[in-house]
Image: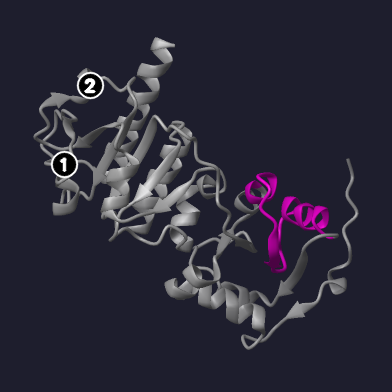
Amino acid sequence: MHWKFRKMQTYKKIASDQNPKIKLVTQLLTQPRKRRKSKLFLAEGVRLVEQGIQQGFKPQFILFCEGLSQRGLQLIETQANTTQAFMVDSALFNKLTDTENSQGILAVFDEMDLVLPDQPNFLLIADNIRDPGNLGTILRSAEAAGTQAVLLSPGCADAFNPKVVRAGMGAHFTLPILSLSWAEIDAFCKNMTIFSAETTGEIVYWQADFCQPCALLIGSEAFGLSSQAQKLQQQPVSIPMAGRGESLNASVAAGILLFEVLRQRHHKG
């Protein structure tokens, strides 16, 4: 198939950092309160913008710069009748991204409330995960393993921080992500067994019964489980290590346990 793209001059060009859309993107990049209040978030990169659109998220607008790939231009063209796209001066666009090799496209999306099952049987609780890259990686693994929702405790990084969204690689478009109080988390998981990843866990993780309705509780590598998390009724499990390291990165530990749940359930059913 051959695509004929509109001439670049037919797209309105933005060259000033005082443009309202540039100001909005800058706020979404740097001001968590603005993100939460507006219920808007940024997705950067061709693949991520594509995934959002494919999952039914409609961009408020798209920004791109010269040198955008053919795949990116094709994506903009397919949205031409429903979404405004603006060409941004390259130097200005580079100020809107903290990636080393930007793909030259970003979109502003509205958050959407994704559907939760009435009786969930596979959840993940993130306890005080502050690093955006770690949290995004956990969300990506949780979505890949079939987790029905991720519950974020107070103290976690903002789920819609651009770094979290980028590391999540599309998880935000399909995985319900809920920021809850500890009382709400406790109530949400009242009919489930909560398994916590701890170096001194009573049983090795592959000995645990993950086929039952369960939630995985993952604390930060630096601080372990918070005092609030420790109040939850839980079953600690350990991940054996043959090397000399004292602990695993939180996202690595989460990935191991998430896919053990998937393995056990696949084997059983």
Q: In the rendering, at what x and y percent does residue 121 appear?
A: 39, 29
In space, the residues marked 2 and 1 are separated at their CA atoms by 20 Å
Query: Looking at the figure, which quarter contains the N terminus?
Result: top right
Asked if residue 230 lies left or right of residue 163, the reply is left
Instruction: Reply above or below: 264 against 224.
Output: above
Instruction: Find disc 2 in the rendering and name its residue.
Output: 208
| Residue 222 visible from this viewpoint | no
Q: Check disc 2 and give the amino acid type.
A: Ala
Q: SS for tag 2?
A: loop
> In the drawing, what numbered circle is on residue 38?
none
Q: Residue at x 50, y 72 (%)?
A: 37
Q: Check disc 1 and give the amino acid type.
A: Ser
Instruction: Find disc 1 in the rendering and name its residue.
Output: 247
Within 10 angstroms of label 2, few (less than 14), some, or many (20 or more) residues?
Answer: some
Region in magenta: 51-80
Query: Looking at the figure, which quarter contains the C terminus?
Result: top left
